[in-house]
Amino acid sequence: GQNIDQPTEMTATEGAIVQINCTYQTSGFNGLFWYQQHAGEAPTFLSYNVLDGLEEKGRFSSFLSRSKGYSYLLLKELQMKDSASYLCAPMDSNYQLIWGAGTKLIIKP
Amino acid sequence: GAVVSQHPSWVICKSGTSVKIECRSLDFQATTMFWYRQFPKQSLMLMATSNEGSKATYEQGVEKDKFLINHASLTLSTLTVTSAHPEDSSFYICSAIGPGHNGNQPQHFGDGTRLSIL
């Protein structure tokens, strides 16, 4: 079967760094997306990884290891507005995104 | 770029009513659109995938006669929830990708429609 494993909830302090881990199992693999979803809103695209390694985009970076079925999202210089759910979504061989429940990130002052 | 507009954002109606939700890609041609449903604190559930000019592909367990999807143009897809009942109350979200889909294009989401059936 296909599944995604992310922590349900994490807490971090404003200005700090947090790493959200994701392990996945899919039928085939065509890359992995990270999305941010604020409560009551639709997801917004953050990053895409298809090759192993780190992709950096401002305060956010995403890492992928295909052999390990593992990815992480790294958020630096945390701001209160970063409080949201973060969704790890790998794409299977049919180019379909597999969605988990995501990680709810709580930022404290 | 890659803006997707979804309308309405909120619907409250009586049981038995049919509700139409529109999803538009404003600045790109969306060859493929996706319709999702999300219950509180749960993951996105893909309902169907629609390609312009062809019938939608529904996920297992989704009633195609209840959730009518039309993707008549490259910028518009509609989802009609027919004879809605309280158990259909949910957050419905559309997303779209442009032409040349080779797997590395992100899905761009509309703002979602919160449907409440009384």
Image (tube, coloured by chain):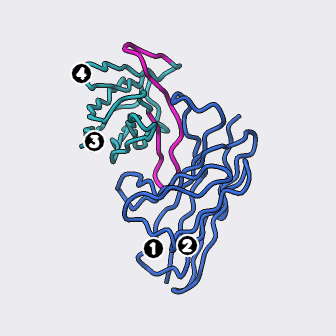
Asked whether the residues under marks 4 and 2 belong to the same chain, the reply is no
- The range drawn in magenta is A34-56
Could you tell me residue A16's position as x and y percent? Answer: 37, 24
Could you tell me residue A98's position as x and y percent? Answer: 38, 42
Look at the image and tell me whether residue A109 can be seen.
Answer: no
Mark 2 Cα shell of 10 Å, populated few (<14), some (14-19), many (≥20): many
Kindly identify which numbered label has been placed on residue B88: 1
Mark 1 Cα shell of 10 Å, populated few (<14), some (14-19), many (≥20): some
**Closer mark to the observer between disc 4 and disc 3:** 3
Instruction: Write the residue at 55% across / 72% down.
Output: B81
In the rendered structure, are the residues bearing label 3 and label 1 in contact, judged by CB atoms less than 8 Å apart? no
Distance from Cα at disc 3 to Cα at disc 2: 29 Å
Mark count: 4
Circle 4: residue type: Lys
In the rendered structure, are the residues bearing label 3 and label 2 in contact, judged by CB atoms less than 8 Å apart? no
Is residue B31 on the magenta stretch? no
Quadrant (top left, top right, bottom left, bottom right) of the N terminus of chain A: top left
Residue A78 position (above or below residue B110): above
Task: Indicate the secondary structure of the residue bearing disc 2.
Answer: strand
Circle 1: residue type: Asp
**Closer mark to the observer between disc 3 and disc 1:** 3
Q: Which residue is mark 4?
A: A68
- Tell me the colour chain B is drawn in: blue
Kindly identify which numbered label has been placed on residue A2: 3
Distance from Cα at disc 2 to Cα at disc 1: 8 Å
Q: Which residue is mark 2?
A: B81
In the rendered structure, are the residues bearing label 2 and label 1 in contact, judged by CB atoms less than 8 Å apart? yes
Quadrant (top left, top right, bottom left, bottom right) of the C terminus of chain A: top left
- Tell me the colour chain A is drawn in: cyan
Look at the image and tell me whether residue A23 can be seen.
Answer: yes
